[in-house]
Image (cartoon, rainbow, N blue to C red):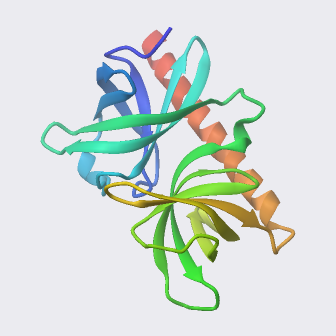
Amino acid sequence: MELKVGDLVSIRHFSGTKLFKSLVLELNSDTILVKLIEDITLLNCSIGDPIVLGYELEDEVYISSCTLLQLDKAQNALKIKIDSVESTTNKRLFVRFPVSIYAEAKIGESQKKHLAIVKNISFNGMMIHSKNDFPLYQELKFDIHAGVTINIKAIIIRKAKDTHNFEYGLKIIYTDIHTPNLLKKYLILLKKEQEEFIKKFKDTKES
């Protein structure tokens, strides 16, 4: 069983403070066109941004890490490419949890802040998108804005570039004993929020 035209899904973008209910309009291989039920202007989207897509199939909730391909404000629609899919029941979920979170990165002791968007995160590493060209193996300090601010130090171990952004794979270096628990609590909260939001779709249909 797969997603179908007419299915309800959730959309998360780092510029929004919540999940957005959306309707599947078109499906083509790994690309999906969705229409937001609420006004798309509530999100400040740009092509290439990380998007998180949530949906339910056969009583199981899935979270997909996606990339924004097209934005149609007149139709209140987003065209997104699915990059990876995780199930919330997967015990290895925290190996790579799809997110779309705003973060600020600093180099060394510099106070200059560079915008970065976290696309996925685990206890050991994360993937970010940024317009900034950082060198491979650069150490960065991150303030991740996730309701509370999570401070993380990480080193770039992989670097790639597409049309819109640099993509970095980073290894997290823990310098505070409280940070792993803070990150774990945040990921559990995200997982619970996603499951409850998606389950409401089913309750709405059955009522």
- Residue 22 picture quarter: top left
- Residue 79 picture quarter: top left
**Nearer to us in this view, 149 or 124:** 124
Q: Residue at the location (80% across, 60% down)?
A: 180
User: At which x and y percent is residue 114?
Assistant: 47, 77
> How many numbered discs?
0
**Nearer to us in this view, 158 or 101:** 158
User: At which x and y percent is residue 127?
Assistant: 57, 55
Q: Residue at the location (55% across, 48% down)?
A: 99
User: At which x and y percent is residue 63?
Assistant: 55, 33
Q: Is residue 184 among the parts visible in the rendering?
A: yes
Q: In the image as oriented, which residue stretches furthest toward the left? A: 74
Left or right side of 46 for 58: right
Left or right side of 47 for 89: right
Q: In the image as oriented, which residue stretches furthest toward the right? A: 177
Figure check: 119 above or below 96: below
- Residue 81 picture quarter: top left
Q: Is residue 151 among the parts visible in the rendering?
A: no
Q: Residue at the location (72% across, 43% down)?
A: 95
Figure check: 186 above or below 75: below
User: At which x and y percent is residue 28?
Assistant: 31, 21
Figure check: 25 above or below 194: above
**Nearer to us in this view, 153 or 163:** 163
